Structure formats: C-alpha cells, structure tokens
Image (cartoon, rainbow, N blue to C red):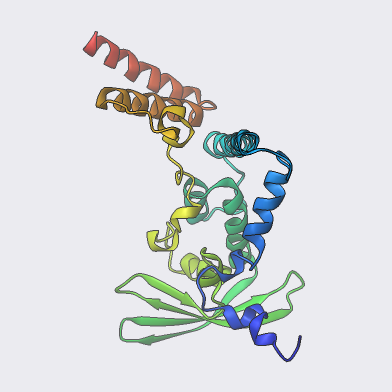
Amino acid sequence: MYAIRHQWVLAYFRELSMCCLMKTTSRCESYNSQFKVYSSEGNTLVQFMLCFEQALNAQRFVQRQLQYDTTTTSPPMLTRLPFELHASQVYTETIFKDVQEEIYEGLYRCSHELVEFVNETRTHFVKHTDKDKILVGEFKVTNNIEENSFKCSCMLFTRISYLCKHVFCVLKTDLIEKIPDRYIHSCMKNDVLSSDFFNIEYRYGVPLDEKFKLRHEFLSLTNLCADRARGDICVLQDMVDHMKKLKDKIW
C-alpha cells in the first residue's frame, strides 16, 4: 500500500477538480443500497419498474424536505462578517454549515503575516493555528486584483469547490462583503433545482402550453416568497399589500 501511495493518498490528487467528493465505487454502491430496499433479484421487469419509481419518489420526498428547510429557515450566524450572511443566502443548508466552519476558522484561527505586491498580484502569507494556538501551517494565498481571483496553496477549492479558511481570512482583511460568483459552484446553490423538478407534468413530459407554464412559475415564486418571509410580519404585510394592488389592477 505504501509503495502505491500515489494511487490513493489524497495529497497526490489535490489539483484534480472535486476529487475528494467521489470515490471509485461510491456511485454504484449508493445505487445498489438504495434500490435493494425496494426491489429484489426475483422481481419481474414490471415489478422492478414499480419499485424503481417508488425509490425515486422517496428520493424526491427527501429532496423536497431539504429544499423546504433551506428556503424557509435562516441558520444562526457565528460571526458578523457580511460574506457569512451572503453564504447563507446562496448555499444549501448542508453546504453552508461546512462553509461557515471555514469562515469561522478564517476569522479566529488564521492571521496575516506578510503581503507581497507584484504588478496586479498580491501574495498573502496566512498562518493557521488550531484551537490551542499551536501552528498548523503557513499557506500562500494569491490574489489577482484585476481578475478578482484567489488561489490558496491548500487547494481546498479545487478539491471540494468552496473557499478555504485562508482565503476567507484574506476576504476579511480586504473588507470584501460577498463571495465572488466564480467561487460559488452551481451544484451547491440552494436554487440549483427548479421548482418544475417536483411537478408531475414536467416529470413525465406532458405537453404544456405557455399559459400553464407562466401560471405555474407565478405560483412557485409566490409560494417561495411566502415561505421565505413567513417569520417576518412586516414583509408578509408588504407582500399582501402588493398582491391586493395587483388584484385590483387585473380584476
């Protein structure tokens, strides 16, 4: 195992995009474990298709629960940094918890030691300590001002696709309020799935006219806004007033 460590040690794959999120057999193993709950080797083709649809419905149900939790709740903030609030608004609840941990450590366990300027590039040297203030390591964060790009020697963004604590330390120092769009991966955003994904008409390819599509989009947006604002009576009242004006206008 030691002799072939270049084939399995994660450090050798740091420069491969999202390499830590997928293992060799994880896809087939997850599929097998999922469908074994609903099906067996003795099923006919028709029985398998019914079990297959039941398994997908179970996945859709879990997805709708997670989507609802993400759109209707506001997670507690651990810092007062503006890009933490921004992260809570763009990431799914699960991903945000991981990003929030990086932001927290970037604020309380990382510090600047030196900054070098070369043309349009700034190089930040960030020291990272553990909870006992023991030095873990020193990392180099390169910031291209013209392109508004960041690159850290820990390669966390390349491996997992969200920014590391060292870059967040630099964002805090530079007073940047939002995470640059280029560092928010689309598959981790809370709106990655359209509401049409859960609609049975869209799922089975039923032909729909333009009026139905617009009506469905309007209802989806209305429900989304109502769910998001359900804890704020002022925002809800403002929505009701706007809807009343809209009703009077088209009635």
- Residue at the top extreme, as displayed: 251
In the visual, does 82 lie left or right of 148?
Answer: right
Q: Is residue 246 above or below residue 131?
A: above
Please state, as top left, top right, bottom left or bottom right, where the N terminus lies in the image.
bottom right
User: Residue at left 45%, top 25%?
Assistant: 223
Q: Where is residue 189 in the image (x, y as percent from the top left)?
A: 47, 50
Splitting the image into 4 quarters, where does residue 41 fall? top right
Who is closer to the viewer here, 215 or 8?
A: 8
Q: Position of residue 165 (x, y in %)?
A: 57, 68
In the visual, does 175 lie left or right of 244?
Answer: right
Q: Position of residue 49 (x, y in %)?
A: 59, 37
Please state, as top left, top right, bottom left or bottom right, where the C terminus lies in the image.
top left
Q: Is residue 137 above or below residue 107?
A: below
Splitting the image into 4 quarters, where does residue 119 fall? bottom left
User: Residue at left 73%, top 75%?
Assistant: 133
- Total label count? 0
Who is closer to the viewer here, 74 or 4?
A: 4
Splitting the image into 4 quarters, where does residue 231 fall? top right
User: Residue at left 59%, top 56%?
Assistant: 100
Q: Position of residue 112 (x, y in %)?
A: 54, 78
Q: In this view, does 55 lie above or below 220?
A: below
